[in-house]
Image (cartoon, helix red, strand yellow):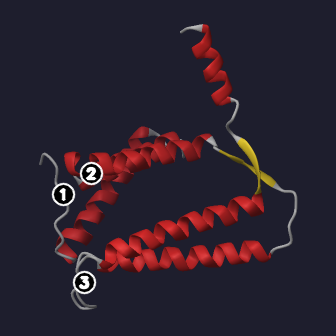
Amino acid sequence: MSGRAIDGLRRFTGLWPRQVRLRNGVVASACVLAAIGALFIWQASLLDLGDFGLPGPGFFPLALAILVVALSIIIALGQWRTVSNDESFELGHRDVLIVFAAGLMVPLLFDFLGAYITLGLFGAAVLILVARVSPLVSIAACALGMVASFYFFQVLLGLQMPMGPF
């Protein structure tokens, strides 16, 4: 590596993690979550909602998105009303960045590998890299979770999830 590349890398890594006031960070995070929830509400409303007895593919995403927006607003208002203090936290923590990077891989692999393998790999990566669970236990837990997901979506709801190469 050249000297300029190393200096650039040092400058970049010196930026993270950053100290942020807790109150501002929580309110900003809640606002971002509310905006993401609003995006999901918009997109889920474009899908068939079905009815309560036989929900369509947009029913659960819409319900969950409404819940995300409502809880985000409650969190933001609750934090905004608290007495301001100088407590801070680190923005850009290693575990948060790992989950963020793994989460970005999910939509890229969802159709290619299939829903269950992709979500199982995401769960295993988070359990191993963030929670520091042994690989054997994390694979067993994710396999059990994917069987439960298959039963819920395929059997109970009759929804066809992307199966990938299988």
Amino acid at the residue labelled 2: Phe
Query: Residue 84's spot in the image, x, y percent?
Result: 86, 67
Q: Residue at x 63, y 44 (%)?
A: 92
156 to the left or right of 146 = left
Q: Callout 3: helix, strand or loop?
A: loop
Amino acid at the residue labelled 1: Pro
Amino acid at the residue labelled 3: Pro
Which mark sits nearer the N-terminus, 1 or 2? 2
- Alpha carbons under labels 3 and 2: distance apart: 22 Å
Q: Callout 2: helix, strand or loop?
A: helix
- Alpha carbons under labels 1 and 2: distance apart: 7 Å
Residue under numbered circle 1: 162
Residue 8 visible in image? yes
Q: Residue at x 65, y 29 (%)?
A: 13
The quadrant where residue 10 appears: top right
Whether residue 155 is situated above or below residue 96 in the rendered picture: below
| Label drawn at residue 74 | none
Whether residue 1 is situated above or below residue 161 in the rendered picture: above
110 to the left or right of 42 = left
Residue under numbered circle 2: 110
Q: Residue at x 24, y 75 (%)?
A: 57
Which mark sits nearer the N-terminus, 3 or 2? 3
- Alpha carbons under labels 1 and 3: distance apart: 19 Å
45 to the left or right of 151 = right
Q: Residue furthest left?
A: 166
Query: Residue 21's spot in the image, x, y percent?
Result: 79, 55
Residue under numbered circle 3: 55
